[in-house]
Image (spheres, grey):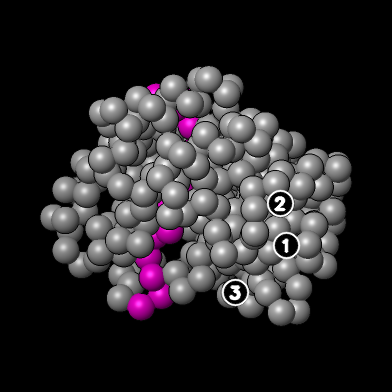
Amino acid sequence: MDFGISSACFYPLETEKSLKIIGELGIRNAEIFFNAPCELSGSIFREVLAIKDHYGIDVKSLHPCTSVCEPLFFFSDYERRFYDMLDFYKKYFNACAQLGAEALVMHGMKTVMRIPDEQYFERFAKLCLVGKEYGVKVSQENVHLFASGDPAFLKEMKDYLKDDFHLVFDVKQMRRCGFTEDDFLDDMIDDIIHVHISDSNAQKDCLPPGEGDYDLKGLLKKLEGSSFDGTCLIELYSSGFDDYSQLKRSFDHLCSLV
């Protein structure tokens, strides 16, 4: 099992600067959260590639800033827009391929303004097909206020997509939706490609690993007992920690649990 960190932790610091900090901390597995379309090509993208190579960072996944727009882009009643945005997302797939990232992380459809579930699954399957052309697994993250926050919805999605179903399991989003990890792991543990990991306590639902009372060791033990071979990536908000050394301590804490 690998451990790493998402560049999203450093938002609103620029993406390339965030990745450099990860490298300077000595962390070699990362998710890159691209914060603007201009970062997907040209001089900024070349800088991201150079930082990745300089520090020997293994980019596990890519998270698009346009995830907030995915209900409108892909999962609305306006089908024409779906195909336009499918073409636009090829920029993300291409970035994944160049970075060596196996997964693109999707938020999907909100619980409001939703299309029928089967239509959602059909469109997601089309995204998966295009992703495959670039060697990328289009992955569904469980997200609060999105349809994917409900494990029952995800189980239906899994039944439809079969081998194309890949889950990015986010524990803080799970907490916000009022579910437990077993609600997801009992039926989908073998479909988890990455974990967005954080700690929590009675007051805060998103803390650096090792600073709360969540049973992280128990979670990791369950993952180890399955076919999971992905990465547990620390994903916090920049307001949730005080300095970068705190993130390194959290990373080291996770590594000590296995």
Q: Is residue 138 visible?
A: no
Residue type, mark 2 in image = Gln
Question: Residue 198 appears at what percent x and percent y?
Answer: 68, 58
Residue type, mark 1 in image = Asp
Position of residue 48 relative to residue 143, above or below, is: above
Residue 199 is labelled as 1
Q: What's the magenta region?
A: 98-112
Question: Residue 139 appears at what percent x and percent y?
Answer: 48, 47
Q: Quadrant of the N terminus?
A: top right
- Is 49 situated left or right of 85 in this image? right
Nearest-to-viewer mark from 2 and 1: 2
| Residue drawn at x 16%, y 48% as measured from the top left | 84
Q: Is residue 17 visible?
A: yes
Which quarter of the picture shows residue 41?
A: top left
Question: Residue 209 appears at what percent x and percent y?
Answer: 74, 56
State yes or no: discs 2 and 3 in contact (Cβ < 8 Å).
no
Question: Residue 167 appears at what percent x and percent y?
Answer: 56, 51
- Is 46 situated left or right of 101 in this image? left
List the residue tagged with mark 2. Answer: 246
Nearest-to-viewer mark from 3 and 1: 1
List the residue tagged with mark 3. Answer: 176
Q: CA distance from mark 3 to mark 1?
A: 13 Å
